[in-house]
Image (spheres, rainbow, N blue to C red):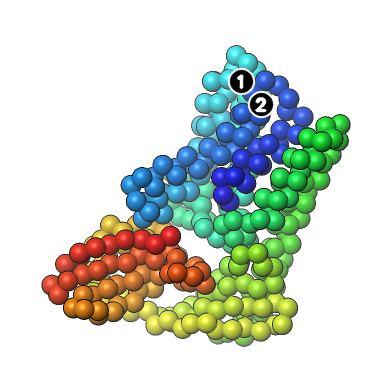
Amino acid sequence: MDPVTHAISGMVLRNLGFNRRSALFILVFSAVAPDLDYITRFWGLDVFLRYHRGITHGVLALAIFPAIMGVIFRKKSSFFYCYFLSFIAYALHLFMDLTNQYGTRILSPFDWNQYSLDLTFIIDPYITIGLLLSVIVGSLNKKRSFIVTICTLLLFIGYIAGRAYLQKETKQLLMTKVDANIYKVYPLPNDFLRWWFIARSDNEIKAGFADLFTKKICIHDEYKLNFDDDAISKSKRSRVVQNFLYFARFPYAEVKEINNKTIVTWKELSYSFLPNDSFTANVVMDRDSRVEKAYFKF
């Protein structure tokens, strides 16, 4: 989820009755704190891609950060009260991120693998608007703000559960229509019944749209994986490609020759439905296969 949505989630939690001094700041700051790793963007988009949702989104940070907040604000409220506020806001951030397809290293630093439920897109306006309405209604009617917040949290859980059901039904539909070994179903922006899918078998990947309403599968592209190509192998020496491959779950590389230059474009197929070659790493090499330029498009 985006930082704005996370900040609003902290404001929603405050309406559960946490009215002591500094409660709002602790909740909002803790709800946003895991995204402090945005600072890695100063070192390049590829570095951000590698380290975003890493250590700050792991279970160790979930234990340590609330303790830091508890120590800082213990004089205004008790340590355990501040720890609890920070913990629930931080934990909600991690759960919300876990629901979408970007991938979260939730078990870091003990396990650096990415985990994701693939239920929501990176930005979900339905969640953002729902949380915002909860804050507004709770502010206008403070006597019922607790009930409003409880209803909001229940609706949020129901929304996630509903998307999980739709994802399951879509995957079952896909398995009856496409023969493959690995099936992955990803959410599309602002859509419920259409999902993006990846179906892999051996060295072939099929990607396309699955429509749960019409019960139709549309294969958008078919990719033959060939990582033994010399240009592809040499492009892996680039820091940009190394960071990209650390993030990507379904990477695919294309090689083109343009004006005596070799251009290798790495795609993350789980995002290949996005326009303008989003989530791609590009490497430009000269005649001697030396890297002249490497860059990432977000």
- Indicate the secondary structure of the residue bearing disc 2: helix
Specify few, some or many for label 2: CA neighbours under 10 Å numbering under 14, 14-19, or 20 or more. many
Give coordinates of residue 25: x percent, y percent.
61, 28
On the question of residue 149 being in view, the answer is: no
Q: Residue at x 84, y 35 (%)?
A: 141
Give coordinates of residue 276: x percent, y percent.
45, 69
Say which residue label 2 marks: 23
Q: Residue at x 34, y 77 (%)?
A: 254
211 relative to 264 in the view: left or right? right
Vertical arrangement, residue 186 with respect to residue 147, above or below: below
Vertical arrangement, residue 72 with respect to residue 165, above or below: above
Amino acid type of the residue that numbered disc 1 sits on in the rendered structure:
Phe
Q: Which residue is farthest left?
A: 288
Amino acid type of the residue that numbered disc 2 sits on in the rendered structure:
Ala
Based on the displayed image, in which of its 4 quarters is residue 170 positioned? Answer: bottom right
Q: What is the C-alpha distance between the residues marked 2 and 1?
A: 12 Å
